[in-house]
Image (cartoon, rainbow, N blue to C red):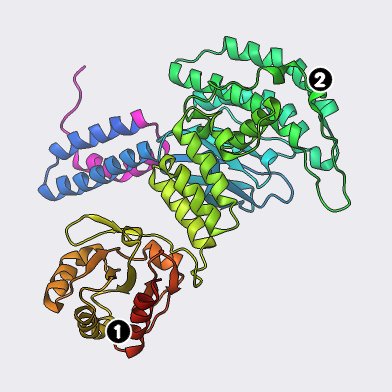
Amino acid sequence: MEERTDFPQYVMMDLAFRFGFIVQEGTDEQVARYIQLGRRAEQQAATPQLAGLIREYMDRYEAELNDRKTYAGIRGRVTRERMNEVNLYKVEDGKECLIATSKVSRDGWYGFAFQPERKGFYTVGGKENLDRIRLYIKPGDQGEVNFPEDTIVITARNTPENLLLARWETMMIPVRERVDNLKYALFDYRDFFPYFMDFLPQAREFQEKLTFRDETFARLVKQTIDFDLDYYAFRILNALKAGKDTFKPSRPTPADYPAYYETIISRDKLTDASVLEQPYGYDYLQRYTTFALAKEGEKDNLSNRLKWLSDDLLKAEIVLWYAERCRTYENYQKILGEYGSFLTTENHRERMNAVSARLYQGKKGEMAADFTYPDRNGKLVSLSDFRGKVVLVDVWATWCGPCRAEIPHLVKLEKEMEGKDVVFIGVSIDQKKDHRKWLEVLEQEGLSGVQLFAGVSPQIMKDYKFTTIPRFMVFDREGKVVTTKSPRPSSPELKKLLEKLLNSGL
C-alpha cells in the first residue's frame, strides 16, 4: 500500500498543532516519526504560508527532541512526614555537590530536569545519608524515585542501569543502617561485624553473577560493590560521639577486627582515580590512608599517606585535605612548596586559592602571598621572582579615574628611583576584552616597569582582602609585607618609605 502524499490542508494544520502533545508525551521514536511526517506535510502544503507555518512548528519540535536527548529528568512521590523538599547532588572530586532543590508539592510530587555534565553517579533525596540514594544518570535518562515512610523506592520507570543499581542499593540498606544509626545507639561494632561477615558471601555472589549488556557499566557496578564494602567497613571503626552527654558507641580495637580487614589495604590498590566517582570518594581516601597508617604502625603525616596512593589525582585530594586543615599561612605555604606539583587542575588551584585567601592576613613582616600573571608579552611573571629587591605593587585598571590620576606621579617616581634596587609592578584588573586598551594605555602613559594583566576579580584581591583600587603595596627584599596599603605615588611619604627600606638593607 502506497503512503498518502496529497495531505488536505486542514490535515496539515491539524498535524502542526497536535505535534506539541506528541513531543511532550511520546517516545523519542514516536516523536521522530511524527516530525518526519510533518516534514512531508510541509513539502505538500498548498500555500507557502502554510508550509512556513508547518516548518516553524517542526523546527521547534525538532529542537525540543534534541533538548530531550541532552536533558535528564527525575521525578517521584514523597509521602514521608517532615520531608518537604528533595535535593539533587552531583558527584565532584568524590563529594556530593548540590545541583538543585525541589519543593514537594501539596499532592506529594517533586521533580528535576537538568543537563548532566557527564554520565555518572548522582544522588537524590533528603539531607541525611540514609535519606539519599545513588543513581547513574546520562543525558536523556528519565527516572522515578519515590520516598514513602522509612524507605526509598526506585520504580520500574527507570533506566536499565538504575534498575540494576537498585538491586545492590537494596541489599546494602541493612549495612548502611548499622553504620548510619550509630548515633542513635541502635547498633555498634559488635552487631556490625557478625552481620557484615554474613553479608559478604551474598555480596560476592551478586558481584560474580552480575551481567549487563553494557560491559563498561557492569564493571563500574562491580567496582562500586568493592568500594561500598570497604567504605562502610572503615566507617564502623570511627564511630563518633553523637552529642553532649549522649550515647558514645564503643570503638573496636584491632583485636576485634574480623578477617576482612586483613585484605582491605594494599599499596597497589588505588591505582586510578575511580573512587572519586563515588559520592563518598573524598572521605574514603581519608579513611583508607588513616587505616593503612595505623595498621602498619606508620607515623601519620602527609608524606606517609601519599605512599599508599599510586594515582596523582588521589594524591592531590589528600594534599588538599591537609591544606584545608591548615591553621596558619606558613603551614599552607610549606605544603604548597613541597607537594604543589600534584595540584594540576583548575579545580585544585581554585581550592588552594580559597585556603590561601582564608589564612592569609597580610600583616607586616608576614611572607607575601605570591601571585603570577602574564606580562605585556604574555610571559608569566611572579612576585617571588623579585626576591632580593624592594617591590612596589600597583593594582589598577584603565577605567579607574583615581588610578589614572596617579600614573604621572608613578612615572615620575620610577624615574627618580631609576638604578636603585626597587621594582615597580603594575597589576591590571581590566576585563579580558579590554586587553588591547590596556596595552594602548601603557604606551600612551609611558608606563615601564613590570606590567601584568590579572583580569577581573583576581586572586591578588582575595589574598590581600581589598575590593577598591588603586591599591599600592610594598614588600621588602626578603619577600615580606611592609604594608598592603601604602601611601600613593602622589604623596611624598611613599618615596620616603622606599628609600628607608633601601637604606636599611631590608
Q: Nearer the viewer, residue 502 or 293?
A: 502
Total of numbered circles in the picture? Answer: 2
Residue 194, label in figure: 2
On screen, 241 above or below 487?
above
What is the magenta range?
1-29
The residue shown at (64%, 49%) is 107
- How far from the left and from the top, in percent, is residue 331? 55, 53
The residue shown at (34%, 28%) is 29
| Residue labelled with disc 1 | 489
On screen, 30 above or below 199?
below
The three-letter code of the residue at mark 1 reads Pro
Q: Quadrant of residue 295?
A: top right
Please identify the quadrant where the N terminus is shown.
top left
Q: Helix, strand, or loop for circle 1? A: loop
Callout in the foreground (1, 2):
1
| Magenta portion: prevailing SS class | helix
Drawn side of residue 270 relative to residue 22, left or right: right
Q: Helix, strand, or loop for circle 2? A: helix
The residue shown at (24%, 79%) is 417
The residue shown at (81%, 20%) is 194
On screen, 36 above or below 53?
above
Residue 370, label in figure: none
- How far from the left and from the top, in percent, is residue 377? 16, 58
